[in-house]
Image: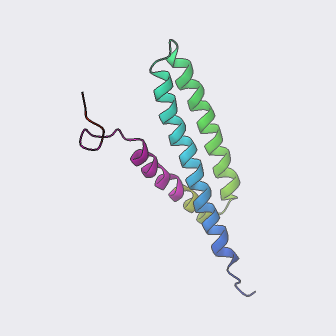
Amino acid sequence: MPDDGSGLLVWAGALLAGGVLGAVFFGGLWWTVRRGAVSPTPARWFLGSLVLRIAFVVAGFYVVGGGQPARTGLCLLGFVLARAIVLRVTRPLSCAQAPPCA
């Protein structure tokens, strides 16, 4: 069977899907920490968020991986890369980068 390049598209899709799963997971964690820190019931925020985020990611890995180790690995790679991106985007600005600190 000739290779028409569709394998590369599947692999790129798995990598992209892993990135989306990671962005939702770690972005949701960041959002939860910000909301839970000021909530009168932070345990509900953290527990509810944990359950929803894990359910979403496990279902996503199951669908994307489809029993193929290579696709699952690429999905995991995208997930880890998304973690690095979310960490960079959500880090607090230093006084040198921010407007004048009080």
Colour mapping used in the image:
rainbow
Residue found 62% across the figure and 61% down from its top: 14
Q: How many labels does the image show?
A: 0
Q: Nearer the viewer, residue 44 or 61?
A: 44
Quadrant of the frame with the C terminus: top left
Residue 51 to residue 4: above or below: above
Residue found 50% across the figure and 35% down from its top: 29
Residue 10 to residue 84: above or below: below
Tell me residue 47's x, y (percent).
56, 24
Residue 33 to residue 2: above or below: above
Q: In this view, does 32 lie to the left or right of 13?
A: left
Quadrant of the frame with the N terminus: bottom right
Any magenta on residue 94? yes
Q: Nearer the viewer, residue 79 or 23?
A: 23
> Within the image, what quadrant is residue 54 found in?
top right
Q: Residue furthest top?
A: 40
Tell me residue 72's x, y (percent).
60, 59
Q: Which residue lies furthest to the front in this view?
A: 100
Residue found 71% across the figure and 83% down from its top: 4
> Within the image, what quadrant is residue 53 found in?
top right
Residue 22 to residue 12: above or below: above
Residue found 32% across the figure and 40% down from its top: 93
- Give the magenta-colored segment's residue range: 77-97
Any magenta on residue 88? yes
Q: Nearer the viewer, residue 28 or 52?
A: 28
Q: Is residue 81 left or right of residue 3?
A: left
Tell me residue 30's x, y (percent).
47, 35
Secondary structure character of the magenta stretch overall: helix
